[in-house]
Image (tube, helix red, strand yellow):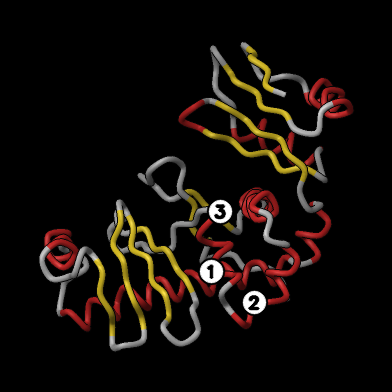
Amino acid sequence: MTIDIKKPLEIKKVKNLLVENETLLFVLTEQSFSRNYIANLQEELAKYVVSEIKWMNKLYIVPSISTKTVLENLNGFYKCIELFDKKAHYLMNLMADTFNINLSNSGEIYDLKINRSDKQRGSINGEWKYHFHGKGCSFISSSTKQFLDVQIINNLEYGELDTYSLMKFIQTTESLREMSSILNNESNNMQKVIEILRINEYLIELPGAFIDGLIINRNKKPVA
């Protein structure tokens, strides 16, 4: 159900609407949704994920795994993101070493993308295939089929997350099979994990990112 609103609804009203509607889409016409409002709404809706499309001033509320499930597996999901972050930086540094480029120089990356690659594609040491596209570069392991999509527009920060690429990384990483089964191939579940980790400050905003980017908080880890 899509609803145009002039200001964010009270949480009680949102809950009442969910009694009769499985999903909700709010379009805010005159204000913007604050992070506090979204976080408070998410904390009240344990079996839903609350997702903001910031540039469109929209808020989706759809069914997902429970907050309890996410928190019970907090260490596992944090490790998924930590592994993605480390592998993303490893691959970009491997690319730099292989092709002798300076990652701080966007011109050298552009030259590799346009002039030294075949249709923006290539391979690294025969183990990783890469494909530049838009603001990112995807990598696929030739042996394990592990997949990563790395954003390359944030200077030397390569850990920016998005729902699709993080879930695909988890699905294609053998050691993360248990976490993948919890997600059950549902993007709403992956988004719920991201939102709960963000609320608990295990993910933080990336300054200057394109449309509300998030990265792992390297200064805060769940207690084992």
Residue 54, relative to residue 78: is it above or below? Answer: above
Q: Crowdedness of circle 2 by 10 Å Cα count: few (<14), some, many (20+)?
A: some
Where, by quadrant of the figure, is residue 11 drawn? top right
Q: Which mark is residue 176?
A: 2
Q: Crowdedness of circle 1 by 10 Å Cα count: few (<14), some, many (20+)?
A: many
For the residues bearing labels 1 and 2, Cβ distance under 8 angstroms: yes
Please state the horizontal and vertical placement of residue 115, each as a whole percent of the image.
10, 65
Left or right side of 194 for 13? right
At 59% from the left and 64% from the top, the residue drawn is 220
In the image shown, does 61 or 22 lie closer to the viewer?
22
Q: Which mark is residue 163?
A: 3
Q: Secondary structure at mark 3?
A: helix
Q: Secondary structure at mark 1?
A: helix
For the residues bearing labels 2 and 3, Cβ distance under 8 angstroms: no
Residue kind at label 2, given as amino acid type = Leu
Residue 96, relative to residue 212: is it above or below? Answer: below
* Residue hosting label 1: 169
Of the residues under marks 3 and 1, which one precedes in the sequence? 3
Please state the horizontal and vertical placement of residue 165, each as a whole percent of the image.
50, 60
Q: How many marks?
A: 3
Q: Crowdedness of circle 3 by 10 Å Cα count: few (<14), some, many (20+)?
A: some
Please state the horizontal and vertical placement of residue 164, each as a whole percent of the image.
54, 55
Mark 2 and mark 3: span between their CA atoms? Answer: 16 Å
At 38% from the left and 43% from the top, the residue drawn is 210
